[in-house]
Image: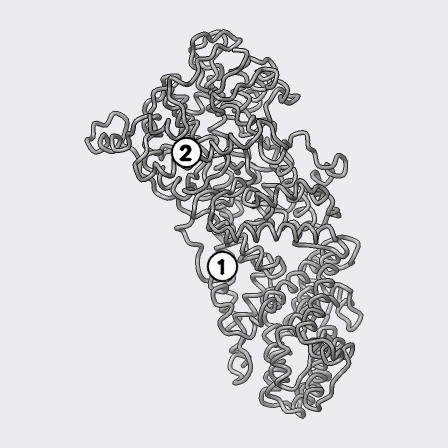
Amino acid sequence: MEASKLQIHALVEEIKEGVFRNVDPYTLVSLSAYDTAWLAMIPDSNEPFRPMFKDCLNWVLDNQRQEGWWGVCDSHGNPTIESLSATLVCIIVLKQWNVGKANIDKGLGFVYANLEELLKENYGGCPRWFAMVFPAMVELASTVGLEIVFPDRMKGAVSDIFSRRRQILETEELVDKPYNLPLLAYLEVLPSSYAINEEQLVKHLSDDGSLFQSPSATAGAFMATGNKSCLAYLQSLVQRNSNGVPPVYPIDEDLIKLSVVNQIQRLGLVEHFVREIEEILKQVYRNYNNEGSSTKQMNLFSEKLYKDSLAFQLLRRHGYRVSPGIFCWFLQNREIQDHVDKDQEYFSSLMLNVHRATDIMFPEEYELEEARSFARKSLEKNLSAGNRDQHDFAPSSSHRVLEYLKQIQHELDHPWLTRLEHLEHRMCIEESDMNALWKGKTSFHRLSSSHNEKLIQLAKMNFELRQSVYKNELEELKRWSKEWGLTDMGFGREKTTYCYFAVASSTTLPYDSLVRLIVAKGAIIITVADDFFDMKGSLDELINLTDAVRRWDSKGLNGHSKTIFEALDHHVKEIAEEHLQQQGSDITKELQDLWCETFESWLTEATWSRSGWIPSMDEYLETGMISIATHTLTLIASCLMSPSLPSYKLRPPQYETLTKLLMIIPRLLNDIQSYEKEQEEGKTNLVLLYAKGSPEVDIEASIAYVRDIIAKMEKQIFQLALIDGYSDLPESVKSLHLSCLKVFTMFFHSSNRYNSDTALFHDIQKAIYVPIQSETLKPRKHVLPLPHGSTSKEYKTTLNSYRFDRSSVKSRGSLAAHEVPRLTSRNGYKNMVVPALKFRLSFI
């Protein structure tokens, strides 16, 4: 275990050095093979048979992956559909400059071997960007002498992609309203039927000389017009990013940093980068306060909304005072809402991010409620559409689509308060597209491969170390429970594993924290004692046990009462001794008083039940908020936190508002799930009391009434726990309160999972016992072409089996080689085929 900690520490330091310490943010994002290849196509103005940006060509030569493809990969090293267009354009540019024959053969081999796998999932629909780019790459390849051939079984799918492009071109304006990236942003792949004059082109150039900050589109614009502003942009781009270029330039650096923080948080690594994350969020917060959300680098509302909702989500969860208006501005634009509603698949990832940003609401934040409702409806429509792959803002291949739809379903079915962090971290580690940051023109912006691999490696090591710690602690806890006679009481619930699982999975405490075992032991004692008061002990036994707790003396006790008291006494002494060593003060009396209050509440409820007494709602809640014993667990454990809870905060009943809310909400959650059972047993709870006091109200209305109380209180507890100034409890203690609430919400959200013997079985296995499946972290194996120069009969046969005539391509709406215009640019590239452009400029 110590060796694992040292390995983790070493990798953390390596990541800090490579990601946070005076690091150029551009190095954190994967370079774009697609855009780099387009820059490599540009001929030198003085020597037109040489590339203007030779370093870009060299980058293409040097950055082909071992399997033969170019482009970004998912979290586990697998190519995505994005690799098809990137690989095609790279082999085209190598063929254009007559270099890298072996690279070309290897790239074609990858395309032939993986085309079906990467395309078949998109049969019947494909992302808009892919429909624009892929057919153009097939056509462009033929102009440089490369025949991209398809097996007969794939011709239908390919035909559909060409048809999809035709539909887009027929229905969309060249520059439409800023909801989708306009057609003009795909200038380098527009067909020759588009007659665009220089005046039109220049009209849409940004101040920096770019066409929508797209390197590839700007390269196309420069090759068509020789525009000096475009050239200046491209030169600045290459100077800023030597060799390979990013998919968009300039990139919003705050967005890059926010995306990295989000990755780290979702992978469960915040504990290792606390200071670095705080520095980033402070800077982002200052930028929003000083300037608002910058739009100068944002061409689409979707990119701006993605950044703003991500910033709100991260800033709020880290305690910053941010207004919902930071991203809810889209609610003021009916046109935007209508567009999202019409194309919910396209904006699914964006709406998922908006939905996550609304997880934590404070009182009277009606904008957030409206945003959540809008995002939820959009995501529900997306789910109802099934596996139709129209996700320009979501991963593209079928297993990724299914995985992505599962993510959406998970988000909608399990509110943030019901999710345990440890399990969420595992799910994210195993996601294939965890490194997808936000959608660009032809691919996701992704964390660079080297940084992503290190983060995934660290997350896996961190998770496995925690599993090892949790497994050992659980065995220790089982021994303790058996030693003190709590395991085999012969009645009630044996919940040793449940208690520990809930504590360990709900909060990220240090590896060696005693708090997990302290809380788990307290929860076990509470479960056993509560069941004793509910179902086993006679009223005399309960009175005697409660009196013994008041006196803190076991004299006169025997049987189960004595067992419970002795386990409790040992537990309190253990905590008091630890606190004395840590803090130098004795809190034995405070701990005893807290437990005494809890036992007295159980006795009160037992007396009501056995006498048939029906309390008022206020009387019931005053006792019930104590008997649920959330404060007993949380406040006692808080004494051992760092910084710890002051001992005077333990004294009942003068608890902080945050603690009182933590006492009430779980009680009400329990009441909703247990009212039928308690009604049968002659007991009462708030659901039954409200229905009884209002004859016109049925039980469903009573449940709705209680749920409404819970919803309002959850917003209050969020504000108290997350924002400075609302509670003077230490931050660590507030965090523990929130974790405790998550546990009880998980237990009682949709059923009483705590009372079930099987409901948590799979979650416990994944959290503690089952290692992260190594298969999910290995790249898929791909069929590789034989080495360049091979004369293998099998290899030649394979290539021949894919050949088909050009007319079959042309029939699907493509262009034959002789139809691609020969362009003479204003820089004097006479009679040279410029493959980057397939549209006619009216002035040529």
Q: Pick whichever, 134 or 404, lies toward us.
A: 134
Q: Is residue 27 above or below residue 692?
A: above
| Residue 756 in the image, given as x and y percentages of width and height | 53, 74
Which is in the foreground here, disc 2 or disc 1?
A: 2
| Residue 754 in the image, given as x and y percentages of width and height | 56, 72
Coloration mode: one colour
Quadrant hosting residue 542 = bottom right
Q: Secondary structure at mark 2?
A: helix
Q: Are marks 2 and 1 in contact (CB under 8 Å)?
A: no
| Residue 64 in the image, given as x and y percentages of width and height | 40, 30
| Residue 58 in the image, given as x and y percentages of width and height | 43, 21
The residue under the point 21% across, 34% down is: 794
The answer to whether residue 667 is seen in the rendering is no
Mark 2 Cα shell of 10 Å, populated few (<14), some (14-19), many (≥20): many
Identify residue for label 1.
Answer: 467
The residue under the point 61% across, 43% down is: 340
Quadrant hosting residue 104 = top left
The residue under the point 58% across, 74% down is: 524
Q: Amino acid at mark 2?
A: Leu
Q: Amino acid at mark 1?
A: Gln
Identify residue for label 2.
Answer: 84
The answer to whether residue 259 is seen in the rendering is yes
Q: Pick whichever, 26 or 647, lies toward us.
A: 26
**Seen in the image, is 453 located left or right of residue 737?**
left
